[in-house]
Image: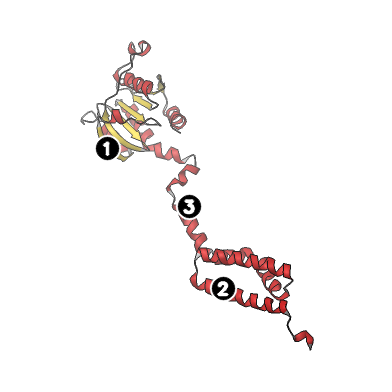
Amino acid sequence: MNFLIPNITDIIDILLVAFLLYRVIILSRKAGGFQLLIGVGLVFILYFIAITLELRMITSFLSVLKDYWIIVFVILFQQEIRNIFLKIIHNHDLRLIFKDAKKSVHSPLLNAISIMSFRKIGALILIENQRKLNEYVETGEIIDAVISLKLILTIFNNKTILHDGAVVIRKDRIYAAKVVLPLSDNIEYTRKLGTRHLAAVGISEETDAFAIVVSEETGKISAARDGRIVTDISIDELAQRIKDETS
């Protein structure tokens, strides 16, 4: 009957199992992510201790958990895992992962430019980059509105007081309108370009802004950057330039 008499290791084994079950019950009541993490860590620590001390009972008990630890982990942390995925789904910065999302942001702008080009509505639009255009914005009117087709067409309607000047786009929003810009004195351009085009070149000489011009006379689209201007470009080419120059 000596085999029924527990030795010191058996007593330790029984006490560890009892303690483990007690902690699982307590942690399940609290249901907190941090507490559960401590509980999982405790299970692994006890497992290695049990193996080292050759505690047969607790080793067998923990081996079952070890074989299904992934399932146990998902069950214990299902709420925390769910919350993490919800945060990822609702995170507004997730669009940065998808390169094509930038295109949708500029779609209203490109549609407006295409319409203005067809209707020969003069326009001057700046897309701000790293260099802030605060000193120029001060000469115009702050709008700070979401980019929309109707708003852009309204601003550049020659019957409104905002049409004479430039629109500044900052962080995918129409930030200001009726902005006064410096004119380029580059002889190469002064002899053949109008005021809007010279203003586009002028601002691109002084800042890293990307300037877009729609000619009131011809309806042709031009783009200026780094003191250089490219005239008579298609709407598709403009879309690519916006993507390249403002990314």
Left or right: residue 201 versus residue 24 is: left
Which residue in the protein does label 2 denote?
Answer: 23
Numbered tag placed on residue 143 in the rendering: 1
The type of residue carrying mark 2 is Arg
Within the image, what quadrant is residue 196 found in?
top left
Q: Nearer the viewer, residue 86 or 112?
A: 86
Element at badge 2? Answer: helix
The image position of residue 27, as x and y in percent, is: 53, 71
* Disc 3: which residue: 88
Viewer-side residue, 147 vs 22: 22
Residue 242's place in the image compared with 97, above or below, is: above
- The x, y position of residue 132, in whole percent, is 35, 31
Q: Is residue 222 left or right of residue 49?
A: left
At label 3, which amino acid type do we have?
Ile
Pick the front one: 118 or 174? 174
Q: Position of residue 194 (x, y in %)?
A: 30, 17
Mark 1 secondary-structure assignment: strand
**Of the image marks 3 and 1, the number of the one nearer the N terminus:** 3
